[in-house]
Amino acid sequence: MEAWEKVLANDKDFQASVHAQVGCVLCHGGNADVEEMNEDGMNAAHEGVIRDPSNLTCGSCHKTIAEQNETSFHTTLAGMKNGLIARGGDFSEGSELAQDFDRHCNSCHTTCGQCHVSIPTSAGGGLTSGHEFKSPPKMKDNCITCHGARAGNEFMGSYEGVPADVHRTKGMQCSSCHGDEVHYSIGDAQTRYQTTSGPSCDDSGCHEDVLTNTEGNPQHEQHIGDLSCYVCHAVEYKGCYNCHASLDEDGEPVFTTEKAEMEFKIGLNPVSSSEIPAKYVVLRHIPVNTDLFAFYGDNLLPEFDNVPTWKYATPHNIQLHTPQNESCESCHGNADLFLTEKDIPEDEMGANQGVIVEEIPDPEW
């Protein structure tokens, strides 16, 4: 077919949708008055066309969502930036780190269209179902293309020997738990765990009776309040180590991770609050280290030890029965489950003092 004969928006589902009724030009620009059906006509019709008009036009109809989304963690990546600022990172205008962040981290920044109609550009792009808009986004084509390295693969059971999350086996999607927080305006929150929009096991409408009805469940009666749900009900997940930002031989930004391995570690709660009061939580090593940005300059994170490299984790591989909840002895006295000094390299020891477990729970409790 000739280029002007290819129509990306001619499937019947899209033609019957609200978006089809407003016309292409309203969102994408261009010239709708061209009548010539040839290459010249195609070029004239597409003059001034905006390939991805999300940030310019979606708010015209979806004002509230667009305004909230503009300041969401999903759009601003503020959680990542705040983590680097806490380590002494300089994000003043024109600083080396600010430029590096834009060059690397913002490459994952998506638009409305890259969640609801196409695969994100960072994952190769391309429409997911013709020009049909999807609400919520498609789990495999949108959510997991960006969040697949850890959360997506855990949820789907893609790691050898690790089953899919029990919620996935029940047919749940990412949006089943995360729908409210995707567009949520963060306000003063520094991390997503400080917002009120994130999912919670006990107040989600699914397990609301866990805290109030422990009859017949001595494990819940004994441990609720001291342990996060994940301590007993998550299984192995992936941790990433020694990540570095640099440019490849073509000058394109790349991340390299020297080590990524399956692990399970329980540690002290680094984000203790009324919403997350547990003493013991699951921790994951995040892809940050002292020389993360060494390719661009020396000591760009001068206060590295301010924040742990083992962070509060919410793995996406929940199971009812797990190795650590088979019996009391499976956890109590089992030093391999807990984050101790032997798990920490010397240059990260200072950063993790607040989460290291110094005394393993006694098996004779």
Image: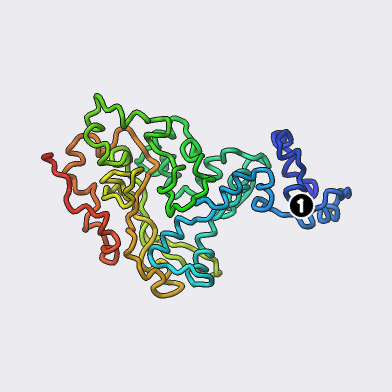
Q: Residue furthest left?
A: 364
Q: Pick the residue in front: 179 or 327.
A: 179
Q: Which colour style is shown?
A: rainbow
> Residue 52, position in %: x, y?
67, 52
Q: Residue furthest top?
A: 216
Report which quarter residue 133 is drawn in. top right
Quarter occupied by the C terminus: top left
Report which quarter residue 86 is drawn in. bottom left
Residue in the picture at 71% in, 40% down: 19
Q: Is residue 274 left or right of residue 170?
A: left
Q: Pick the residue in front: 250 or 96.
A: 96
Q: Is residue 202 above or below residue 65?
A: above
Residue in the picture at 37% in, 71% down: 302
> Residue 241, position in %: x, y?
36, 59
Q: Pick the residue in front: 310 or 151.
A: 310
Q: Is residue 20 above or below residue 51?
A: above
Mark 1 burial class by Cα count in 10 Å: few <14, some 14-19, many 20+: some
Q: Is residue 308 left or right of residue 171?
A: left
Residue in the picture at 78% in, 50% down: 3
Q: Is residue 184 left or right of residue 307?
A: right
Report which quarter residue 298 is drawn in. bottom left
Q: Is residue 269 left or right of residue 63?
A: left
Q: Pick the residue in front: 192 or 144.
A: 192
Residue beneath disc 1: 29
> Residue 187, position in %: x, y?
49, 51
Q: Secondary structure at mark 1?
A: loop
In the rendered structure, which amino acid carries the disc numbered 1?
A: Gly
Q: Residue furthest bottom?
A: 298
> Residue 100, position in %: x, y?
50, 67
Q: Tally the numbered discs.
A: 1
